[in-house]
Image (cartoon, rainbow, N blue to C red):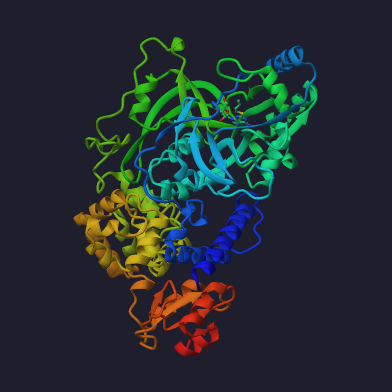
Amino acid sequence: MSRSEAAERIKQLREELERHNHLYYVKAAPVISDQAFDLMLKELERLEAEHPELADPNSPTQRVGGDITKNFPVVAHRYPMLSLGNSYSRDEVAEFVARVERSVGRTRYTMELKYDGVAISLSYRNGALVRGVTRGDGEKGEEITANIRTVRAIPLKLQGEGWPAEFEARGEIIFTKKQFDKLNAERAAAGEELYANPRNTAAGTLKNQDPKLVAKRGLDNFIYTLQGEGLPTRSHYRNIMAARDWGFRTPMPERRFIEQADDVDGIMAFIDHWDKARHDIGFIIDGIVVKVDDLDVQEELGLTAKSPRWAIAYKFQAEQAVTRLNAVSFQVGRTGAVTPVAELEPVLLAGTTVKRASLFNADQLERLDLHVGDLVRVEKAGEIIPQVVGVEKEHRPAHAHRVRFPHDCPECGTPLIRLEGEAQHYCPNEHQCPPQITRRIEHFVARKAMDIEGLGGETVEELFRAGLIRNVADLYDLTAEQLLALGKGWGEKSARQVVEGVEASKAVPFEQVLFALGIRHVGETVAKRIARAVGSIDRLMALSREELTQLDEVGEVIAESIADFFAAEGNRAVIERLRKAGVQFEGAAAAGPVSDKLAGKSIVVSGVFRNFSRDGIKEAIERHGGKVSGSISKKTTFVVAGADMGPAKRTKAEELGVPVIDEEEFSRMIGE
Ligand code: IVH
């Protein structure tokens, strides 16, 4: 392919990919498969690698995150980022309307949601994203463009027409509830502290210096205003709708995320609706915003010191309740992390009864200055995990005892440690501290780990108390007789179920076994990546810290945790026993070739197949001694092509005289 052909193809692929990205992330209406998307992306990646001079920071390939950012430069906002006046009652909203109308007469309003996230200003020049800046102090903010590019709801290049040559789109970066729950589930599985609420997590994520990590977090965005000269109309509402056509994620009128009204009744109807419906959407809102719609009228009304006179936020009643703190318990998790938990007098909060609330860590206890018997304010942080946010000190009972974080593990008495830079205290007695043992075993038997049926939290504790299991290897020595001898609650059927479940777990693939071991920071995804890259536990154990950091997804922290895990004598002994019992410590990647039919051959796989998955074909190549290669070159022996193979690849294969075969021919070749 000539350079100009490559340039043309790159342009075409970028436009196509950006369009499909928009259909997927903004419209939620994809028209091609993920595989087809990936194929195009791979082709673009390859072409960009071959033509570095054609690089573009706004290429869809950059959405996975670029290099580490050393620090974020502070830059001045072209137009200050104002805040909104708050109101907490309908009366205050009515007063706002009256004030506006005294000043400018009757006018039209636009009402929209108040997203509970982080404000961001996005600058576009000639239809391309050039800069993303945080709100900062409203005058100056931090330039975090590299992170912003990874947010898939934000267009890197605009579609359609009518955008000014230069303007800013402002909006809110948020986590959807689904994405936030997913993130916390991953953290829980990796034995990491949970994030408290989506807003703070979004703020923290945006300031992370590793854009690749930001890309993985899956942030979202809504645009709520446009700033600049030459906007398409003088109506805020219509400008937002124009922004929608340019590819931004904006509030949808069809879901009543945005509406217009000509009087206070229309505004109240919107408030009434969202006061009730606020929990029924996939992200968190903390109120609604009422704006004068006409930009000229906005200008006429002007600003106060910090906020515009033409807009007001109506904040929902905070989801708080006051109740009594009966006690604070200290829970020891699988990794030894000790978390203080408030034991509360049950209270109704946002539709559920709350009896316990998180206190997170020692610093939080300190900040709250909690005493047993205090009346505490409980909030659903981001409406997800209840949390104690304050204390009504004036109601403190006389002689109440201050809650102190223990020096020693509440379960086993070992002195706690606090690692540098971490907020959490840990009990280091991992092999003898009972809850650490039982939670590790619970993690081991869980569905996503060894998936042992018939064993859950309570059974594990029972077997532990009865002295039948002290570690995960003991599970493989359990007999039906031992279980039956426990008496109450055990019968032939339940005993057999456990023994058979343990037996069946010996077939669980290595990647799941690695996750089941419960190495700190090694969640499901990381375990999978490592297992596939390394292939066996022996090879993993032989890797040095430095070698570990060379693996995909493994940074310093994970590498250290893995090395520490395998350095511990006790862990190695357990692994040996599991190995003897027949647990899988080798994965597909590690299995030796079954034939040498493809020995010495370098093979490229491209497209979608009918009888194989792409990974299946790649595995088959390796099983037969061949080598899978990512891109076509003079050294390629042949290409296995499925449907959807990109035209560029086909041309390249032709140019280089590399044969292209289909999956049937490939099957015949390997005799499978
Ligand atoms: S308009 C001058 N609209 O609330 C008006 N702000 O204190 C500028 N926010 O930091 C903001 N949803 O990040 C506007 N629909 C919405 C909003 C919204 C959330 C945030 C914004 C700002 C804060 C206002």
What x and y, as percent, mark residue 635? 38, 80
Visible residue check, residue 557: yes
Question: In the picture, residue 171 is in which quadrant?
Answer: top right
Q: Name the foreground residue: 148 vs 479.
A: 148
Q: Name the foreground residue: 385 vs 175.
A: 175
In-image side of 366 versus 164 (left or right) = left
In-image side of 618 versus 349 (left or right) = left
Q: Which residue is found at the position 49% from the left and 85% from the top?
A: 659
In-image side of 80 versus 427 (left or right) = right
Q: Which residue is found at the position 68% from the left and 47% from the top?
A: 161
What x and y, as percent, mark residue 76? 47, 29
Quarter of image, ligand 1: top right
Q: Is residue 327 above or below residue 217?
A: above
Visible residue check, residue 257: no
Q: Which residue is found at the position 30% from the left and 48% from the top?
A: 557
What x and y, as percent, mark residue 667? 50, 86
In-image side of 104 versus 43 (left or right) = right
Q: Which residue is found at the position 56% from the left and 60% from the top?
A: 11
